[in-house]
Image (spheres, grey):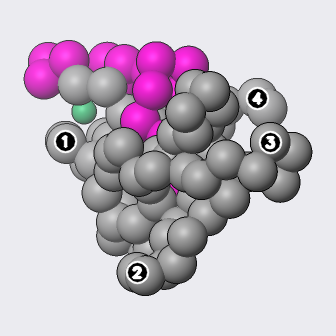
């Protein structure tokens, strides 16, 4: 279970990187030499049971009446606790 919060970093040329960050550390794009700026926290916020970024391609509907979206790598709905079938990778 990942406990570290991950962040979205962006360079001036719009190149993006997703990683954990250490406070006070500057991250530089190895190819362009540009500095990355932290532009956002990645959902789900740590600590989360899912290792996947909270984005459309990683979500599925639980199927319960709450109609909540759940990360595909979870084997139970985080809203209602219903067990979910494994997803083919
Ligand atoms: Zn549910």
The answer to whether mark 3 is within 8 Å of ligand 1 is no
Label 1: few (<14), some (14–19) or many (≥20) C-alpha neighbours in 10 Å = few
Q: Earlier in the sequence, mark 3 or mark 4?
A: 3
Label 2: few (<14), some (14–19) or many (≥20) C-alpha neighbours in 10 Å = few
Relative height, residue 37 to residue 64 (above, below): below
Distance from disc 1 to disc 4, alpha carbons, whole Å, reads 22 Å
Q: Earlier in the sequence, mark 2 or mark 1?
A: 2
Q: Nearer the viewer, mark 2 or mark 4?
A: 2
**Total numbered labels:** 4
Label 1: which secondary element = loop
Distance from disc 2 to disc 1, alpha carbons, whole Å, reads 36 Å
- x then y, percent, for residue 40: 33, 45
Q: Nearer the viewer, mark 2 or mark 1?
A: 2
Residue under numbered circle 2: 23
Residue under numbered circle 3: 32
For the C terminus, give its image quadrant: top right
Distance from disc 2 to disc 3, alpha carbons, whole Å, reads 22 Å
- x then y, percent, for residue 29: 73, 51
The answer to whether mark 1 is within 8 Å of ligand 1 is yes
Residue under numbered circle 4: 88
Q: Nearer the viewer, mark 3 or mark 4?
A: 3
Distance from disc 1 to disc 3, alpha carbons, whole Å, reads 46 Å
Left or right of residue 58: residue 87: right
Q: Which residues are magenta?
A: 50-67
Label 4: few (<14), some (14–19) or many (≥20) C-alpha neighbours in 10 Å = few
Residue under numbered circle 1: 80
Q: Earlier in the sequence, mark 2 or mark 3?
A: 2
């Amino acid at each position: 279970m990942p406990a570290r919060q991950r962040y979205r970093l962006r360079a001036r040329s719009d190149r993006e990187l997703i990683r954990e960050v250490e406070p006070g550390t500057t991250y530089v794009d190895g190819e362009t030499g540009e500095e990355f700026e932290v532009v956002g926290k990645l959902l789900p916020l740590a600590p989360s049971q899912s290792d996947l970024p909270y984005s459309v391609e990683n979500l599925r509907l639980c199927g319960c009446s709450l109609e909540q979206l759940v990360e595909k790598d979870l084997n139970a709905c985080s809203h209602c606790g219903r067990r979910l079938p494994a997803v083919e990778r």
